[in-house]
Image: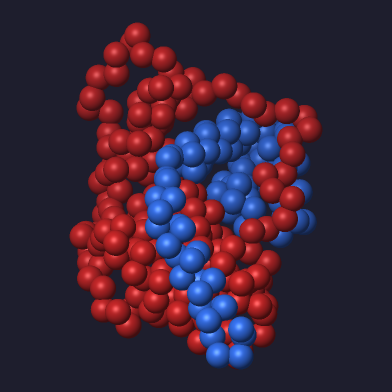
Chain colours: A blue, B red
Amino acid sequence: MSLKRFFSFGRSMQCDAVMAVLQSYLDGEIDVVEARKVARHLDRCSDCAVESDVFASIQRHLAGRPFEIDPEIRARLESFGRSLAHDAPGTA
Amino acid sequence: MFEQLVLPEIDLLVRVARSLTRTTADAEDLVQETLLRAFRSIESFDGRYPRAWLLTILRNTNINLGRKKRPGLLIDPDSTEYTDVLSDHETPESRHVDATFDATIDEAFAALSPDFRQIVDLVDLHGLAYQEAADVLGIPVGTVMSRLHRARRSIRNTVAARGLDSQRPHTSSPNRPLPTTSPKWTGR
C-alpha cells in the first residue's frame, strides 16, 4: 500500500466514524469526550464539515416550523391542573 | 410538588399529545387525563426525571383511552420504505437558494411515512431527547435513532439530489463550537 493510499484510507475511516455519529452529535446525544473528537475532526475535514452544515441546516428548519398552542387550551389545562392541586382534600 | 413539577410541562404535554392524536380536542383530553393521573400518583413519584415520568404517564394514558392512532400511523415504518422525493420537479432558477432549500425540506418531510414524521416532530419540533421519544412511543431508543436518522438522511438525499447541498453557506470555522453544552438526555 502506498503512503498516499495509506493516509487516504485512514482519513476515510475516520470520516466514516464521524458520519456514523454526526446526527447524534448535532442532537447533543453523544458524550462530551466523543463530541470533542467529532468537533476536532470537523475543524480539519472540510467534506465532513459541509455535511455537518447541511444536516444542521435541515434540523434548524425542521425545528423552526410553526407550532402554536391555542392559548385557550393552555389556560384551560393550567386551570385544571391548579384546581387539582388546590381542591384536593388536605391541601386547602 | 405537583404544581412545581407538572404544571410547567403542560406545553410539552400538549405538543407531544398533538403528535399522538388526531385532533386538537383529543390532545386536550389526553393532557387533561394525564394531569389527573399524574396528580393521583404524585405521592409515589420520587421527583427524579419528571419529564420522563410525565411522558410515560401520557403514553400509558393514551393507550388506556384506546385512541385510534393518527391516520397512517398503523403502517409499520420499519417494514415499509418511505418515499424519497427525487428531483423530477424543475426548480425555477429565479427562486432564492434558501427558499428552495426550505421548500425542498418541507416537501421531503411531507413524503416521509407518518411514523417517521412523528419521530422528527417529537425530536426536532418539540425538543424531546431520544430517550424521551422512546418513552412516549414505547419503543427502544435504538429504534428512535434509526427512524430519526433515516428520516433526516432521506431529506438530506433529496436536498443533494436537487444540488442544493453544495449551495448552502459553509459555516465551518476553526473554533467550531459543540452543538450543545450537554446532552439533552442525561440518563436515569
Q: Nearer the viewer, residue B115 or A70?
A: A70
Side of B103 where A89 appears, left or right: right
Q: Residue furthest top?
A: B94
Rendered position, A41 above or below B95? below
- Residue A3 in picture, x, y percent from top left: 71, 36
Give the residue displayed 23% in from the left and 24% down from the top. Answer: B89
- Residue B82 in picture, x, y percent from top left: 27, 51
Rendered position, B46 above or below B49? below
Q: Nearer the viewer, residue A12 or B172?
A: B172
Give the residue displayed 66% in from the left and 78% down from the top. Answer: B1
Q: Nearer the viewer, residue B51 or B122?
A: B51
Side of B124 where B73 appears, left or right: left
Rendered position, A89 above or below B73? below
Q: Residue furthest front?
A: A92
Q: How many marks?
A: 0
Q: Is residue A21 visible?
A: no
- Residue B44 in picture, x, y percent from top left: 60, 90
Side of B84 where A78 appears, left or right: right
Q: Quadrant of the C terminus of chain B?
A: bottom right
- Residue A43 in picture, x, y percent from top left: 73, 34
Residue B63 placement: quadrant: bottom left
Give the residue displayed 29% in from the left and 13% down from the top. Answer: B92
Residue B154 placement: quadrant: top left
Q: Is residue A22 visible?
A: yes
Rendered position, A57 above or below A10? above
Give the residue displayed 35% in from the left and 31% down from the top. Answer: B104
